[in-house]
Amino acid sequence: MLNYTTKEIKERSALVVNPAKTCQPIGAMYAALGINKCLPHSHGSQGCCSYHRMHLTRHFRDPIVASTSSFTEGACVFGGKSNLSKGLETVFELYNPDIVAVNTTCLSETIGDDLTEIIKSTNLPEDKVVIYANTPSYVGSHVTGFSNMTKAMVSHLAKKERDVPSNTINIIPGYVEPSDMGEIRRMLKLLDIPSIMFPDTSGVVNAPNKGKYEMYPEGGVTIEELKATGDSKATVALGSFSSKEAAYELEKRFDIPPHILKLPIGIKATDEFLMSLLSLTGDVFIPEELEIERGQLLDVMIDVHHHYHGKKVALFGDPDIMIALTEFVIDLGMIPKYVITGTPGKEFERTIKGMFEKADLKECVVKAEADLMTLHQLIKNESVDLLIGNTYGKYIARAEDIPLVRVGFPILDRVGHSYFPTVGYKGALRLIEKISTAILDKYDETCPEEDFELVM
Ligand code: SF4
């Protein structure tokens, strides 16, 4: 399928082949689904909305609902004001959400529709809420869209009602799976820390099948909780690309100190997450349950390190996940030969280069705003033992006969990601299992008969 990918790498500034990202509104829509009883609304043409819904539906294998302003030729010429106003009135009348989260698209951004003015002049039911984010897809990626909608939750809803901050800590979990958000919440509960996590898609896009269709499942942060984020004593933002803007907005508006951390993927990043939480609460004890989980993870790392130690790995996907994963594979003794993200950002390259330098890894390559063709060409020049990334990596995996561990967004051809976390100690254990299994399966398939072992 990728038979024509050449080994020779040429500088391409105006051509992307097999992008390692998707468009802003997808991330905005995913973030919006993390609000309880929220209907995402796409301000643009139907095709955009269908694509965004379909992509999310395929990844989560759950029906993703969203409405659209449904632009036609008229809206393209005269603007989408009447489409959005009429659309919002109809949505509240027919589907009765508590809140609608509007994202723009390339078209409405190019026209220059003024969402503030349009929504202000729309006849909305008194008890209902509309928030919105500008998400032009010719800037950034789906991660930028997630960040913009998460920031919009703060700028439209957060309030300061108290003179003295509450004991609550705001947690912004980043662009991760609902299973990861659930795992973060479980760790917070074990630490007994009062928190507001937003967005929270657990229980929404991985809701249980109850035998009848529910348009708004039980999960998601509530509007009341979002309002109360303005009274919290601190914000912990996980993953700077997807979460820091909302944390800075809370600081700007309400003077709430932001703490920007890596996603808690891997043992070191999970330690940092838990220790940062403890330092914010003044507590000093880690609950026994988490200590046991950490000890088990350490035990497995020691038991099976010979499976992956020294193996070369290519990683591609969203920047926050790549940053945490790179640190984790270095901790496992692997060599992160290539680390690629499609999302732009020099900060990404600086952070990963810092990790290479610290681990004395001289021949490794990091690229932001890169595509999968570049990754494939790099692999053609010097191959790796393992690929870690989303489903789109399967074409390179097949062409070069390299095992692929699926992590990130989107995963369109396997199940499990919505239900089993990759964050926390439990998530790290699962990642080790997947990495180790992929490497050993490949070895079992290809090794000479005399090396085919029962015990490995
Ligand atoms: S037109 Fe823009 S917003 Fe719509 S699907 Fe394409 S990239 Fe995404």
Image (cartoon, helix red, strand yellow):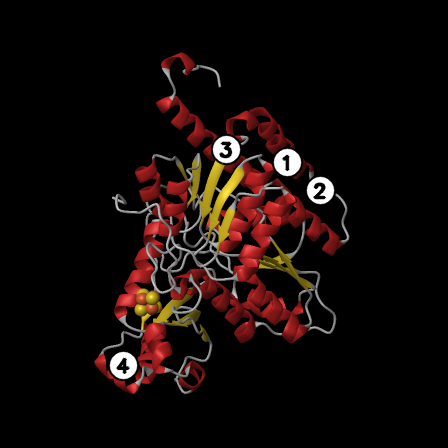
Q: Position of residue 422 (x, y in %)?
A: 51, 43
- Residue holding disc 1: 294
Dot 3 surroundings within 10 Å: few (below 14), some, or many (20 or more)?
Answer: some
Q: Amino acid at mark 4?
A: Cys
Please, what secondary structure does the residue beneath circle 4 have?
helix
Q: Amino acid at mark 3?
A: Lys
Please state if 320 lies on the left or on the right of 209 as rendered: right
- Looking at the image, is mark 4 or mark 3 nearer the viewer? 3
Please, what secondary structure does the residue beneath circle 1 have?
helix
- Residue holding disc 2: 286
Earlier in the chain: of badge 4 and badge 2, it is 4
Q: Position of residue 387 (x, y in %)?
A: 42, 40
Contact? badges 1 and 4 (CB < 8 Å): no
Quarter location, residue 163: bottom right
Q: Amino acid at mark 2?
A: Ile
Compared to residue 8, the image places residue 107 above or below, namely: below
Between the residue at mark 2 and the residue at mark 1, the CA separation in whole angstroms equals 11 Å
Between the residue at mark 3 and the residue at mark 1, the CA separation in whole angstroms equals 24 Å
Between the residue at mark 3 and the residue at mark 2, the CA separation in whole angstroms equals 33 Å
Point out which mark residue 311 bears. Answer: 3
Contact? badges 2 and 1 (CB < 8 Å): yes
